[in-house]
């Protein structure tokens, strides 16, 4: 009996040693145990967390890239890493690395640029030009013709401003080494990160392409009054896309996109412009996105409110009024 207990204890000790021997290297890597030698580390434009992890291993800052990626996601740092040059040490733990790479880089001439939700491609170009980061003509040319290796771009038909809607609105840091290509890649990479495979699968469940969803989300972004009614605006457009009686989205924002001017009130002549972006003249979605939608607008396009609404109007107090019938809509329009 005593021998059995000794054998069991011995087995447990061996098992414990085995588990510790497996876990210890990961714990050691996480807390940081290297030397204090300073290493110059550069995060390139468009670099993903996986690519950063591999570069950190090559620089001897970490040993386990996959573990780093898991802890980065778990700690909420994915998508927050900045572009530029950083001074790191082999002795740094993961938390120190996360904080360092998500803070302002050591790069000379680094600029923080915020792209607002609902900005059109031309407005993004203007903003970057004003910051002295791009040549405007080259930016347009690269956006239209460069072969970006992102799968979500492959199914987009050829059209003017093909990246419209896909330059994700967010805060970025670019430096003097940034090029038109690298800036565009960074913004596209952010889109690729935000619009996950699950969201793309949801689009398929709705019988829509990703481009359909981004197009619809861009209209929602421009029409909705923030969080308060975004999902209901989405429901109106979804209901119209299914309606035989009211198949026209009749979105003022799509006409404003054609005009390249955000007129507060459209004329009858404006609504009769012959363009595939004119949702007063052509049923269904416009030819493509009309702005860069944020994450909430994209989610609203994918998950609309469950309503019978077919109309909405902005009343005199700046509140959207929704209606299921035209008669009710006319009453709302008088408020």
Image (spheres, rainbow, N blue to C red):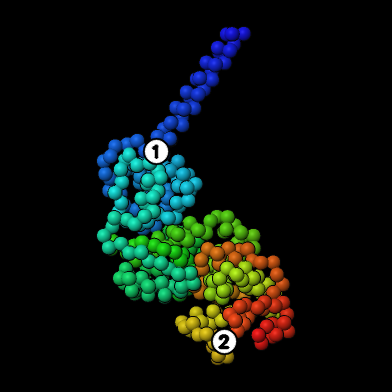
Q: Is label 2 in contact with label 1 (beta carbons under 8 Å)?
A: no
Give residue 172's quadrant in the image.
bottom left
294 vs 97, left or right, is right
For residue 244, say whether it is visible. Answer: no
- Identity of the residue drawn at 66% across and 66% down: 305
313 vs 112, left or right, is right
Give residue 8's quadrant in the image.
top right
- Identity of the residue drawn at 46% across and 44% down: 71
Q: Pointer 2: residues within 10 angstroms few (<14), some, or many (20+)?
A: some
Q: 181 or 226: nearer the eye?
A: 226
Question: Residue 271's mark?
Answer: 2
Q: Secondary structure at mark 1?
A: helix
For residue 271, say whether it is visible. Answer: yes
Question: Residue 310's mark?
Answer: none
Tell me the quadrant of the picture where the C terminus can be found.
Answer: bottom right
Q: Secondary structure at mark 2?
A: helix
User: Where in the figure is residue 32, as x and y percent of width and height?
Assistant: 36, 38
User: Where in the figure is residue 271, as x and y percent of width and height?
Assistant: 57, 86
Of the two numbered discs 2 and 1 in the rendering, the one whose residue sits closer to the viewer: 1
Residue assigned mark 1: 31
- Identity of the residue drawn at 62% across and 8% down: 1
- Identity of the residue drawn at 44% across and 64% down: 170
Which numbered disc, 2 or 1, marks the residue that appears first in the sequence?
1
As measured in the structure, the alpha-carbon distance from the residue carrying label 2 to the one carrying label 1 is 62 Å
């Amino acid at each position: 009996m005593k021998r059995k207990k000794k054998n069991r204890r011995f087995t447990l000790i061996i098992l414990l040693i085995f588990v510790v021997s497996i876990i210890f290297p990961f714990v050691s890597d996480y807390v940081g145990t290297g030397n204090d030698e300073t290493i110059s580390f550069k995060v390139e434009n468009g670099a993903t967390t996986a690519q950063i992890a591999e570069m950190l291993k090559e620089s001897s800052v970490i040993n386990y890239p996959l573990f780093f990626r898991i802890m980065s996601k778990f700690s909420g740092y994915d998508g927050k890493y900045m572009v530029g040059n950083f001074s790191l040490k082999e002795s740094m733990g993961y938390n120190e690395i996360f904080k360092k790479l998500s803070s302002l880089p050591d790069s000379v001439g680094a600029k923080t640029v915020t792209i607002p939700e609902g900005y059109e491609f031309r407005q993004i170009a203007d903003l970057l030009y004003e910051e002295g980061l791009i040549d405007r003509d080259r930016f347009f040319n690269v956006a239209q013709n460069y072969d970006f290796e992102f799968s979500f771009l492959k199914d987009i038909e050829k059209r003017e401003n093909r990246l419209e809607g896909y330059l994700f609105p967010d805060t970025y840091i670019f430096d003097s080494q940034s090029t038109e290509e690298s800036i565009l890649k960074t913004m596209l990479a952010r889109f690729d990160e935000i619009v996950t495979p699950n969201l793309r699968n949801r689009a398929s469940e709705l019988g829509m392409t990703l481009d359909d969803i981004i197009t619809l989300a861009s209209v929602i972004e421009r029409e909705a009054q923030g969080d308060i009614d975004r999902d209901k605006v989405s429901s109106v457009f979804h209901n119209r896309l299914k309606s035989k009686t009211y198949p026209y989205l009749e979105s003022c924002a799509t006409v404003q996109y054609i005009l390249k001017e955000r007129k507060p009130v459209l004329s009858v002549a404006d609504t009769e412009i012959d363009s595939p972006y004119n949702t007063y003249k052509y049923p269904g979605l416009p030819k493509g996105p009309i702005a860069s939608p944020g994450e909430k607008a994209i989610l609203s396009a994918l998950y609309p409110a469950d309503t019978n609404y077919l109309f909405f109007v902005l009343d005199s107090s700046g509140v959207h009024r929704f209606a299921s019938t035209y008669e009710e809509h006319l009453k709302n329009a008088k408020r």
